Amino acid sequence: MILIKNGRVADPEKLEERRGDVVLKDGVIAGIGQIPDDGSFDSVIDAEGCVVAPGLVDVHVHFRDPGLTYKEDIRTGAAAAAAGGYTTVVCMANTKPPVDNADTLQYVIEEGKKTDIHVLPAAAISLGLKGRQLTDMEALAEAGAVGFTDDGIPLTDEGLVRQAIAMAEKLNVPLSFHEENPVYIKNNGIHHGRVSERLGIYGSPAQAEDSLVERDCRLVLEALSAGGAQKAGSAPGVGDAIVNIQHMSSRRAAELVRQAKSQGARIAAEVTPHHFTLTEDAVLRYGTLAKMNPPLRTEEDRQALIAALQDGTIDMIATDHAPHSPEEKSRPLTEAPSGIIGLETALALGVTELVDKGYLTIPELMSKMSLNPARLYRLNCGRMAVGAPADIVIFDPKARWTVEHFRSKSSNSPFLGRELTGKVRWTICEGRVVHEG
């Protein structure tokens, strides 16, 4: 039994913060309030000056396991997550082999059980991630898949997307879509604009993202219409979403999602810390460490993403944690793989870029990083309430620190050497301290 004393308890459901104590017992939150230390606790954590909040939930990580474990594996990925305050992560399916069958799915589940946090698997939407034929989604859901995604590869077959939406509705699980139409892209990972022109490459225009977001908003609305007036008359939240738009990067995509939500679409959206922090100019400074799919775009896009976080158009902050080796990232800009790691810097970037600059309060940030991600995957976590799971992050929102090393196997991050605000002090999962920093 653990007593957490003197903290600022952040409640993402009520969007409030209050000073108080928290008791963890038998894997759940047993009490919140003014609780004296009567000597009966196994340990007491003094959280003076810290925020006590639900453990973070990341719906978008790549642990590269099986098949690419020189970049990351489930054990090291989970350790990085715990260091960043995460108690639950959802792994993407683009491993080698992909998670399109029960055996590979079971491997991820069993390896996840060996870690200190909750590692949950998403399965592939299409067989072999080829975008031609649906996986046996029903069997995979029964075997433990919490959702479905071909992340890393866009689904260009509209008919297949319709089939996937229909099956997801039947199973009540979310689909997560990577929205980049390859028809418009010549060099992925770099925004088509001022910087790409300076570098002499074409890059990836926002139109590549916008076109697929527009299509999928339309398809979700068509599914809503087919569902009848009762469903159409409801006001769906993130926990009702059938489609999640991953790692949004453009202002037009944000507006399309906003419009679809206003019409009752069962849709959710996520943004990464790098997309609300950096712009295309980062490529000039950091090179391949600022290359990702979709790419960093303009300052106008960045500001639109922050506005979409503020008004609820974007429901979640997800890292798209994408480890790569130094050798891979040392290749020329047009040849290096896209993606950066993010689990260990995400919370601090949220505090530094969103809270300290007045865009979000801490409870609002926790709703984007704990409550709403949990709701998307219909998980019983992300809440700060008696009876909720004892998955907790305790962080000092005023502590300044410099990003110097990672628990991840990889270090491909443009934030190395940067001073950030907001330091994770303790991560607790199922009532056990799994990280102390």
Image (tube, rainbow, N blue to C red):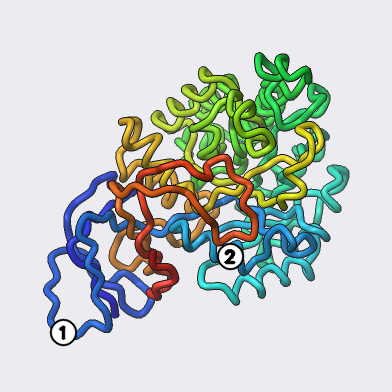
Residue drawn at the location 55% of the way across and 54% of the way down: 377
**Image location of residue 349, percent across then percent down:** 44, 41
Instruction: Identify the secondary structure beneath mark 1.
Output: loop
Image quarter of residue 414:
top right
Relative to 379, 182 lies left or right:
right
Placement of 334 over or under 386, stated as above or below:
above
Quadrant where the image shows the C terminus: bottom left
Horizontal relation, residue 286 to residue 211: left or right: left
Image position, residue 279 (x, y; %): 56, 26
**Quadrant housing the N terminus:** bottom left
Dot 2: element: strand
Marks 1 and 2, the one that precedes in the sequence: 1
The alpha-carbon separation of the residues under discs 1 and 2 comes to 34 Å
User: For mark 2, what is the residue?
Assistant: 119
Residue 308 spot, x, y in % from top left: 46, 28
Label for residue 39? Answer: 1
Q: How packed is label 1: few (under 14 Cα within 10 Å), some, or many (20 or more)? A: few
